[in-house]
Image (cartoon, helix red, strand yellow):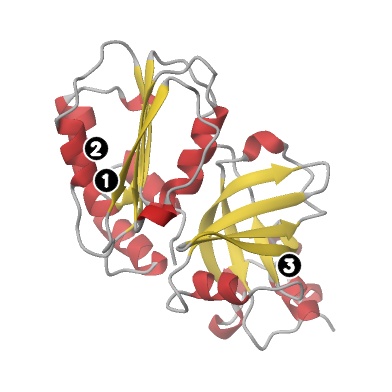
Amino acid sequence: MSLISKIDPNKTQNSHFLRVKGVKNLTPNMLRVTLSCPSVTHVDESCKGAHCKLLLPPSDMSEDIFKQVIRIRPSELNLDERPVRRTYTVRYFRPETREIDIDFVNHGDNGPASSWARHADSSSFLGLLGPASPKIKEFYADWYLVAADMSALPVAGATIEAMPKKAQGLAIFEVTTEADKQSFSTPPGIKKHWIVNSNPHTSSIAQLSFLENLKWRTGILQTCIAGESSLIKKLRHYLMIEKRVPKQDAYISGYWKIGLIEDEHRACLLYTSPSPRDATLSRMPSSA
């Protein structure tokens, strides 16, 4: 009897089985994995920048068993049967070929998702939940502020590329090396500023310092800001308290925390429960 046949239909989940079509090094510290996703028919190319859950297969689990396991809610599985879950961002989705691109920060084999991506080939597979809707669904501001570290480059790049051609504003990117700078299809009015931080696992306030020295524009500001949680907390205070950016105009989210993996970060957020707005932090795209 199959695993799925023993499960109450009300305790299953809508998942997708994806197979690797290609892997390439975007930069020294970023990998792009292209996946075939024939069953993902509920979204179109506008889902780039949306979050999704990746379900990583145990190394000793067969493809047939894995296809069953990803359809079952984790609460109905033994701990050793549950795939590792990590939250990532859809970088591109091509509906005509049913292909999805996911970018992974390359941490070596220190994190389960990074390790999986580094060793992925045409025989590799994973599960997918989602994608959800993009965080920024419409662009209406007088100017825009985008800020991201390596973990948030996918959502930052997708957001910039979705902006109207006449958009004005600033994008701040903090990367590990000069060679980690990426090219985006950026509106001419969005000025890019790159910060190189060779040790991203030590606290950095370089983005905040840059903003504090910025000549502030007038008009409606819309933000897309994501990265390490301690910096995000400072940026949120600066923008929403000192600069009085309205809540509805600000996407500001902590994607990871120095010293914690995603599961520990989520648990920490659940216990501290900073505010209803910060609930988005528990859905952060992972850098592990």
The secondary structure type at the circle numbered 3 is loop
Residue 257, quarter of picture: bottom left
Q: Amino acid at mark 1?
A: Ile
Q: Amino acid at mark 3?
A: Asp
Residue 189, quarter of picture: top left
Residue 245, percent from left and from top: 27, 23
The answer to whether one can see residue 282 in this image is: no
The secondary structure type at the circle numbered 2 is helix
Residue 15, percent from left and from top: 71, 59
Crowding near pointer 3: few (<14 within 10 Å), some, many (20+)? few
Q: CA distance from mark 1 to mark 3?
A: 41 Å
Q: Nearer the viewer, residue 6 or 14?
A: 14
**Could you tell whether 108 is left or right of 201 in the image?**
right
The answer to whether one can see residue 101 in this image is: yes
On the image, numbered disc 3 is attached to which residue?
Answer: 8
Q: Between disc 2 and disc 3, whose residue precedes?
A: 3
Residue 232, numbered label:
1
Residue 34, quarter of picture: bottom right
Q: Single out the mark in the foreground, 1 or 3.
A: 1
Say if 14 sits above or below 61 in the image: above
Q: Amino acid at mark 2?
A: Arg
Rendered residue at 19%/40% (across/down): 208
Crowding near pointer 1: few (<14 within 10 Å), some, many (20+)? many
Q: Nearer the viewer, residue 38 or 110?
A: 110
On the image, numbered disc 2 is attached to which residue?
Answer: 236
Q: Between disc 1 and disc 3, whose residue precedes?
A: 3
The secondary structure type at the circle numbered 1 is helix
